[in-house]
Amino acid sequence: MAKPNQTPMMVQYQKIKDQYPDAFLFYRLGDFYEMFNDDAIKGAQLLELTLTTRNHSSKNPIPMCGVPHHAVQNYIDILVDKGYKVAICEQMEDPKLAKGMVKREVIQLVTPGTQTDTGAGNAKENNYLTALTQINQKFGFAYADLSTGELKVTSLDSFDSVLNEVMSLQTKETVVDKSVSDDVLEKLTTVGILISHQDEAEVKSELSYLTQGVEATEQLTVLQHLLTYIVTTQKRSLAHLQRAIIYKPTFFLKMDHYSQRNLELIQNMRTGKKSGTLLWLLDETKTAMGGRLLKQWLDRPLVKRNDILARQKKVSVLVDQYFERNSLQEELTQVYDLERLAGRVAFGSVNGRDLIQLKSSLQQIPKLQHILNELPESAFSDIYKRLDPIDNVTEAIDSAIVNEPPLSVTDGGVIKDGYDKTLDSYREAMHNGKQWMAELEASERQITGINNLKIGYNRVFGYYIDVTKANLNKLPEGRYERKQTLTNSERFTTPELKEKERLILEAEEKSTDLEYKLFVKVRELVKANIQRIQSLAHAVSELDVLQSFADVSEKYRFVAPTFTQSDHDLEIVEGRHPVVEKVLGRQTYVPNDVKMPEETSILLITGPNMSGKSTYMRQLALTVILAQMGCFVPAKSAKMPIFDQIFTRIGAADDLISGESTFMVEMKEANEALSHATANSLILFDEIGRGTATYDGMALAQAIIEFVHDRVHAKTLFSTHYHELTVLDKSLTHLKNVHVGAVEKNGELVFLHQMQDGPADKSYGIHVAKLAGLPNSLLKRADTILTHLEKTQDQHSTVQVTTEDRTVEPEPQPTEPAPQTSDEEADTQLSLFGEPEQKISKADKVASQVKSLNLMGMTPMDVMNQVYKWQQQLEQSKKKR
Ligand SMILES: Nc1ncnc2c1ncn2[C@@H]1O[C@H](COP(=O)(O)OP(=O)(O)OP(=O)(O)O)[C@@H](O)[C@H]1O
């Protein structure tokens, strides 16, 4: 709100700022964009700028900071990357010509989801703006990428599905209307998404084609809000936005975002980067658009047999045709980002260099067509047809734009000679100008007899005749008009020089104006062809991803999988985890079979820690994903059914939203799988139940296995440390035991990484703890406890699997007292800490904790954490003393 005694400028500033309370207002003032008040205080801190004040002599100076106009994009990017919005407020008239206050307006609101200049490093990333509405228990969900014009919409029936979409699209901003509940908004905010409110929906008639064919109320509503938000923030042409495509999550192999994360499809769990992911392995794309499409395919593998086979067929052809594939790669390398170029054409931000990139990309198209023609099969006929070289655009650019245009489109030098007669005549005048001046200089020297007389030019005084002071007396009277006096010379003009100057300057000005007009004309012609460019871009990206699949398939010895028709036979022979194999090296990696014929639905996997159980499970999931993307798979041979969904519970569970315990999340994820999986799904459960007390965990694990076996029938890999569960194969006919082999050599554990039939006979947890470097005395103690526990268990038979009636007998709770230890054992504990018992009460406490430790219910990591805690406690007690 405007404050009393404000200057007219600050009144104008405040009026504009009031319309954008949640954005930084970059207010153009001459060569700078200024921020004031709170924006300035916060902006100076975030952008590391010097904070100054306006009216510093007044009682209430106004905090202020600014950035130079030519560097503004950097600063906008920094703020937007940090999740803020920036309103760019421009001067709408020339300050020299303005009467009173210069008119200013916000020309664009840049937000995290609408940012289109995402930098060269992000060329292979989409930047999705998403939108949400909640109508009659349903969610309308839409998303758009403003840099490429992609627009999609769907209906979702739960918030979990919304979250899946939001997370897998990696959106930074969601547009919502009033219908979205506070609870939903809070959850979205918790996962770091900026919420933008858009309550009105007003889509202009010229954009109504974008929603054509969309009928469901929630879809139409969400699109209208999204489009209104885009129009109000962008305030520029949106000619490249494509008609909304309606999609359904069931069109694709469904995976929740936890699975996508756990399987490390596009993001490394430890580093958050691409390296070490399936995308990293697969990405041999040569164009940025291909890179983006590959990511989309990886997010959404297919489920329709014919679609999968059509892609696979193309990959096969390219695998076989090495030379053609190489040529394709070479030609694709020279195709620029057609999608984003089309976006810049629509926004009007395209420059001469962009048009040259567009031209040279289009010139590659006939070469791509030629290569596809050389291929033996007609598998590529659909792509071939879509490879439209758009000759009229190539010709228009080629005839008009110079080969190496400058960055600016307003300073001339963009249009070719011979393209426009009027432009040529201006250029001639400019060029002749030099000639005229040389001739005039020669004739003036002759007339005056002054040999060092010069004709020069500067921006302030224009053209002048320069005569040294010593020669001034030689100038004839009357003809020479004085312009400027310097120490050693004087500068003059003549009516003739003035006339030539007028012609030259006029030609220059007219020439740049005309060049810009001609450039815009070419740009408009390109704009009229945006849809053709976009459809070409799709075809090129597809070709690029397919060649990348073929390249990777050949390089890493992948094979084409076959898909079973009606039965659920799954047989992978010598399968590999492609990423682990790439990292470890081909020689080190041990391939493994996965054999699950129709009658086997569950593989119960046992084996030591670190032996490769999780890798084996992940390997199968990645093989299925690769197969359903249309790619070859890392195996000697592979036969599988087409899966509809993949559920995984692998690795550490975390829940960003509710802050629930690991065990709670684990159970929720298990529930998700048990309630939604079908006989056509794949379930991977890694050590379910380990997050709670042994008996509880084991009971739950068994009940879950039985439930999957009897009711769900999904193909399931279940790894466990509960060896007691391996007897289940006696009662569950569709369950098979397998284990990862390991052998003990001279007391050392050697992992074979080889999957073998039957259950594992030992857990080897303590051996793994040894590998992790835990102290010898502790390991010795753990061995003693283990022997003791095993004895107790044998005597009391407390842990026993019950399979009768598929129910679990009530088990004793793990609150029973810890096994009594002998004096000799107590001594061992104390020697662990090297201190006599009576002096150290802390050590005493720790020792008693060691005694009561339930090693059976702990992973090596838990043990390490516990030991670390003890070390800390002992360290503190030492310090106190
Ligand atoms: N088939 C294989 N060939 C060679 N090395 C392998 C193979 N599978 C796994 N490994 C190696 O063993 C390591 C441990 O594998 P993984 O995490 O799958 O074991 P795990 O049995 O699931 O362990 P834990 O039970 O402790 O979770 C991997 O990081 C990898 O280096």
Image (cartoon, grey):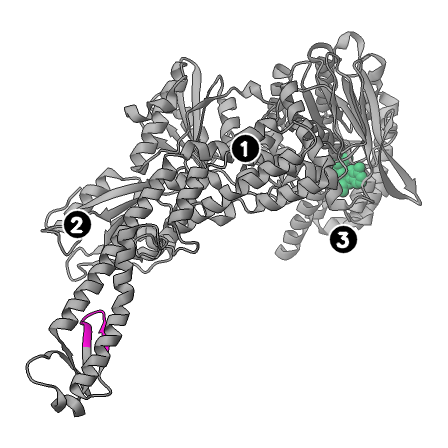
Q: Which of 717 and 671 is in front in this view?
A: 717
Looking at the rendered structure, which numbered label has been put on residue 835? 3
Q: How far apart are marks 1 and 2 (CA)?
A: 52 Å
Foreground disc of the pair 3, 1 = 1
Q: How far apart are marks 3 and 1 (CA)?
A: 74 Å
Q: Is residue 849 visible from the viewing direction of this image? A: no
Q: What residue type is disc 2 on?
A: Met
Looking at the rendered structure, which numbered label has been put on residue 192? none
* Pointer 3 with pointer 1, Cβ within 8 A: no
Q: Distance between the residues labelled 2 and 3?
A: 74 Å
Q: Is residue 471 visible from the viewing direction of this image? A: yes
Is residue 570 found left or right of 543 in the rendered image? right
> Where, quadrant-wise, is the C terminus in this rendering?
bottom right
Going from the N terminus, do you reach mark 3 or mark 1 first? 1
Q: Residue at (38%, 15%) from the top-left corner? A: 217
**Residue occupied by mark 2:** 10
